[in-house]
Amino acid sequence: MHKQLEQEAAARERSAATAPPRHVGIIMDGNGRWAAARGLPRFEGHRRGVEAVRRAVREAKDIGIRYLTLYSFSAENWSRPVQEVSDLMGLLKRFIRNDLADLHRQGVRVRIIGRRDNLASDIRALLAEAEDLTRANTGLTLVIAFNYGSRQEIADAARRLALKAVAGEIDAASIDVAAMSRELETADIPDPDLVIRTSGEQRLSNFLMWQAAYSELVFLPLLWPDFDRSAFDSALAEYASRERRFGGLGTASARTGS
Ligand code: IPE
Ligand code: IPE
Ligand code: MG
């Protein structure tokens, strides 16, 4: 009995100590299936997906999350039909044009990660505008992963380090985990504590693979356009029930020494 009470107290202590995650990444998946289930074109799913983005940003702010990274277009999504790619580009443009002023008013700082060089110049200009306008904001940081691929990001970082070494700017022997982290696009962003993926798929699909080394992963069965506060809360509750160990010993075994 005594043991059980002790365990319950320890569990309460653990969950009380679990502040909201500082950084949440979301793999927003299932727009196409949401539309197909309703006999609608995929575009309609993506359009409703943007509404879910607006909700998620508001909720993240309310919850007190500091960084929210949304996976919006992967480096591999170019392999979709030309029309769908163009629809997704159009939705990003519309999102920035329609929502940037409001995000700015809310004190949101917008950051974009992903390759820019193969994007159309009007999109590049909008991304730059979003970052420039909100640069000094101190509220939620909204990181939009657009045309993003983790492998590409890591390869780019490795290439830059190699070039610096060849140029004699750094010593190749000094390249370590911290040096790589500093070279990534996320250099000044803390690693995600929690990565949520909707739609039931259980994979990272090239999302923040370096940064998510110790993230808690939560897979939700619902489709992205249906993501709402209760889905967010259930992912956070799941996160709060996890024990993050980072390769060390858990609090329970550390306490009992077993
Ligand atoms: C996520 O929904 C949006 C993007 C990948 C851009 P999907 O378009 O992948 O939807 P499903 O997975 O086909 O249902
Ligand atoms: C991952 O979803 C990319 C985004 C959510 C932007 P996908 O639908 O492209 O991933 P796969 O192809 O199912 O792995
Ligand atoms: Mg998908």
Image (cartoon, grey):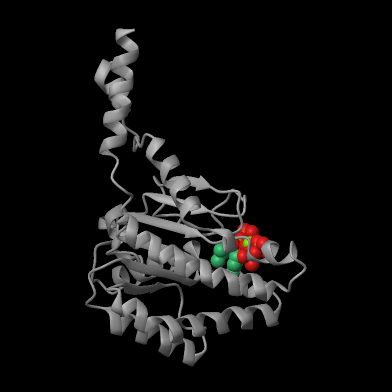
Q: Quadrant of residue 131?
A: bottom left
In this view, the residue in front, 246 or 2, is 2
Q: Residue at x 32, y 18 (%)?
A: 7
> Can you name the residue that lies furthest to the bottom here?
122
Q: Residue at x 43, y 70 (%)?
A: 144
Whether residue 188 is visible to the viewer of this picture, yes or no, is yes
Q: Quadrant of residue 104?
A: bottom left
Whether residue 74 is visible to the viewer of this picture, yes or no, is no
Q: Residue at x 31, y 72 (%)?
A: 108
Q: Is residue 221 left or right of residue 41?
A: left
Relative to 82, does residue 166 appear above or below in the rendering? above
Task: Check the picture and name the quadrant holding the C terminus.
Answer: top left
Relative to 238, does residue 135 appear above or below in the rendering? below
Q: Is residue 85 left or right of residue 146?
A: right
Q: Is residue 67 left or right of residue 169?
A: right
Task: Check the picture and name the quadrant holding the N terminus.
Answer: top left
Q: Is residue 79 left or right of residue 3?
A: right
Q: Position of residue 29 (x, y in %)?
A: 59, 60
Q: Position of residue 209 (x, y in %)?
A: 46, 55
Q: Position of residue 49 (x, y in %)?
A: 57, 69
Q: Quadrant of residue 16?
A: top left
In this view, the residue in front, 213 or 190, is 190
Relative to 158, does residue 99 appear above or below in the rendering? below
Q: Residue at x 28, y 45 (%)?
A: 19
> Can you name the residue that lies furthest to the right here?
39
